[in-house]
Each structure stands twice: as C-alpha cells, then as structure tokens.
Image: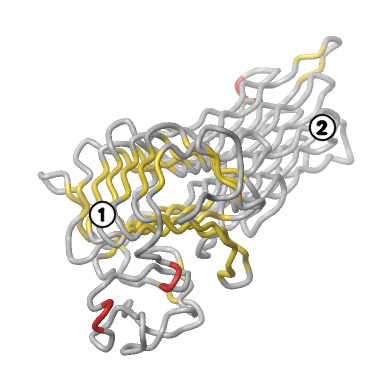
C-alpha cells in the first residue's frame, strides 16, 4: 500500500487496480483485470520523510495536506511558477518550448529541467496553471513530467505517440527496449523469412509469422517501470527494404495540486508505431511497437476526451511469384479504443500483420502459412490515474487500455 512520504527505492502500487465504471461514469477499484495488471511501479526514492520540510505532511505547516507527485522531488512543484497557455511543442532533449513562434528556452517563470528517475533522465516542466488549447507535440528522447501548482486543462491532444519507426519521448526504437519484440530469421532450408515479434509492455506482444520450418520472432515480454515508454517491435528477416519493427510510444506524467480535466476535444496519445512492410522481393515484415506510459495525478481528475496507449499493428509480409507483391505497413496505435490493424499482406490473408493491443482486444500473433511471415501486433502500454479520496469522472471519456487507479495521492 502506498504511503505518502515513504522512502523506498522502487514502490509497487498494490492499491492500483483495473477500473470498473459505475452508473455515474466514475472509475472505482474493481480488482485485478483479466490480464493480471495491478499497476506499474513508481519511483519513490526522492520522497522526503514524513514531517520533513516540503513533504506536505502535518510537520510542515506551509504545505500541510498538499499532494506530492510520484517519481520526482516535490520541491520541483513551484507555487510561484508562471502559467502556460498556447504551448504547441516541447523538446525534452533540448529543453525548449514553443508557444507558436518556434522552439526556444522557456520564458521567465516557467521551468524546464532534466532530473533523474532511477537510471533514466526525464524532462520536468514546472508551471502554475497549464492550458492545452490545441495540439501539443512532445518530442525528444526523454520522458516528460508536467508539474502544475494549479489546474491543468487539456482541450487539445498531447501527442507523445510513436510514428512508425520514430519513438515517442521516452520510448524505444525498433528492436530495442525492455519489451522488444524478437527479430525474425531466415529458414535455412528454404527461401522463407520469418516475421518480427510485436513488442510487449502491459502484456506480451504478438508473435511474428512463421515461415517454412522456422518459428517467427517472439513477442516481447511485459514490464512495469515508471516513466519508461513502449518498446520496439522486432525486424523481419532478411532486411531488404527497412522492414523493421514499429517504435514504442512515449512516457508522460501530468501532476496538478488541484485538478486535471481532459475535455471532449482533448486527449493524451502515447500509442506504439506500426511495423514496416515486407517488400515484394520476398521478405517478411516487422512487428508492432508497444504503447507507452501515462500517469495522471491530481486530487480531482475528469476525462471527457481520450487517453490511449495502444499497440501498433504488425507489418504485412511480402510475396514474390515472378512479380513483386509487397505488403503494407501496420497502423500506428490509435487515439481511441480500436485496435490498430496489421498491414495487408502481398500474398493473401496469411501474410497480414497481427493487430495491435487495445482495450478492445489483445495483441495478435501473425498468421501461419506464409512464405514470408508478417509481424506480430504490439502490446498496450500502461495508464495510471491517481486521485485523493475521490472517484475519477470518465463519463463520456475513452481510456485504452483500462487504467489502474488509486485514491491515495
């Protein structure tokens, strides 16, 4: 059980459960879901002891009963920080921010710094209030943590998703990451090539398509690490046409000391990328990348829009019979509940890539029977929602996969 102010190297939130939605559209703890998920691990090594200055406990009158963010030092929440509105892009590597006139150093009153979470570097944006009133593109190699002393209003989409073979912030590239899909390989007894496996995250990824007498690339394993995004799908065998796996979705944490509201037009997108096609010269395809990591923390959370960390679809295998029949790329993970489709195959249904995982279904293995295997589907990522003593209002909203929830912020 999570205790505010407890020191530990890594904290597993056993109190985080898959959601159940009651008649009012509120999320409530409902026990472990059918995938056995009880929430990702949160880094707690920077939390102060109870009663220490700035820990928000009764021992500090100035911050009494103030909620504290997971993973990063609470002192990074700045009550005097300036408000931020009209942000269109953030670069987590260069520590620059764009308010519509190009990426530049943050303005006075807004802080954007690097800090360590475990073995990883993340970018931390400290603001007063945050209003996202249009698309906000988050780019760079590091995960993003937003710390707001006031309200967070999301009326546009925060984009932290992978795009094909380009990872989201804090995500991994093709054939890399903790849950990377296995690369396909060539059947030495024939000219057949196996497809790459889909990347794992919340669950294992889908298996790549077998070919000849050889098995396809293995699906990536599941893992749970704070502020680590999705992993990359495995490459198809005999890389002739960049037939690599899709990249992993990004990682983002949004904390507010008051409230977070995602409007009907708003969203947080951390989907995985689709696997690349097998070319018509006769090559197999790459597996889908897995969805990323989304953590939202505030005393009150309302979701009318969409929060998604879905897996990418596997690429379709190529076929050669005198003429070249290439497959198609798998779809990137969607901002919604639907599964990303696998790419169409060059030689029929057995060459089609596996669908990526979402709340609508698990990542699919690529089919059998092809001379050049398709890619397996990427797994979903992880979504965690933490409030203080109140249920999470999701009436009319979409969250995919089902989030883990906790009310002990």
* Residue hosting label 2: 192
- Decide: is 383 above or below 350: below
Q: Is residue 15 above or below residue 264?
A: below
Q: Position of residue 122 (x, y in %)?
A: 58, 61
Q: Say if 221 sits above or below 130 in the image.
A: below
Q: Does dot 2 land on a helix, a strand or a loop? A: loop
The residue singled out by tag 1 in the image is 259
Q: Quadrant of the N terminus?
A: bottom left
In contact (CB < 8 Å): disc 2 and disc 1: no
Single out the mark in the foreground, 2 or 1: 1
What residue is at 52 percent from the left and 46 percent from the top? 291
Does 406 sit above or below residue 252?
below
- Whole-angstrom CA distance, mark 2 to mark 1, is 55 Å
Q: x, y (%) of residue 265? A: 32, 30
- Indicate left or right for 51 with 240 as reference: left
Disc nearer the start of the sequence (2/1): 2
Looking at the picture, tell me which residue is in the foreground, 362 or 359. 359
In which quarter of the view is residue 368 placed? top right
Neighbourhood count class around disc 2 (C-alpha, 10 Å): few under 14, some 14–19, many 20 upward? many
Residue lying furthest top in this view?
323
Residue 184, image x, y percentages = 76, 43
């Amino acid at each position: 059980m999570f205790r505010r102010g407890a020191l530990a190297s890594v904290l597993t939130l056993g109190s985080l459960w898959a959601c159940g939605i009651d008649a009012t559209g509120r999320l409530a703890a409902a026990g472990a879901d059918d995938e056995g998920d009880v929430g990702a691990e949160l880094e707690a090594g920077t939390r102060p002891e109870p009663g220490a200055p700035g820990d928000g406990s009764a021992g500090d009158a100035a911050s009494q009963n103030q909620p504290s963010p997971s993973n990063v030092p609470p002192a990074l929440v700045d009550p005097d920080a300036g408000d931020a509105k009209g942000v269109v892009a953030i670069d987590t590597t260069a520590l620059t921010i764009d308010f519509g006139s190009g990426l530049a150093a943050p303005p006075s009153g807004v802080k954007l710094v690097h800090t360590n979470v475990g073995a990883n570097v993340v970018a931390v944006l400290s603001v007063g209030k945050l209003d996202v009133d249009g698309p906000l593109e988050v780019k760079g190699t590091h995960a993003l943590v937003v710390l707001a002393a006031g309200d967070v209003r999301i009326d546009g989409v925060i984009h932290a998703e992978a795009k094909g073979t380009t990872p989201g912030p804090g995500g991994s590239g093709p054939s890399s990451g903790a849950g990377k899909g296995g690369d396909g390989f060539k059947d030495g007894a024939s000219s057949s090539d196996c497809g790459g496996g889909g990347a794992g995250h919340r669950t294992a990824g889908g298996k790549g398509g077998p070919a000849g007498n050889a098995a396809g690339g293995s699906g990536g394993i599941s893992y749970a690490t704070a502020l680590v995004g999705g992993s990359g799908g495995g490459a198809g065998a005999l890389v002739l046409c960049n037939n690599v796996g899709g990249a992993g979705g990004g990682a983002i944490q949004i904390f507010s000391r008051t409230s977070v509201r995602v409007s009907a037009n708003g969203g947080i997108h951390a989907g995985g990328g689709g696997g690349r096609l097998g070319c018509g010269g006769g090559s197999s395809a790459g597996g889908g990348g897995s969805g990323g990591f989304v953590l939202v923390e505030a005393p009150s959370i309302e979701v009318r829009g969409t929060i998604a960390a879905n897996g990418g679809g596997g690429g379709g295998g190529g076929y050669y019979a005198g003429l070249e029949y290439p497959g198609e790329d798998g779809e990137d993970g969607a901002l919604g509940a639907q599964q990303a489709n696998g790419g169409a195959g060059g030689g029929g249904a057995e060459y089609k890539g596996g669908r990526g995982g979402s709340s609508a279904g698990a990542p699919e293995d690529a089919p059998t029977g092809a001379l050049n295997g398709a890619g397996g589907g990427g797994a979903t990522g992880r979504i965690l929602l933490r409030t203080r003593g109140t249920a999470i209002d999701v009436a009319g909203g979409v969250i995919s996969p089902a989030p883990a929830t906790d009310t002990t912020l």
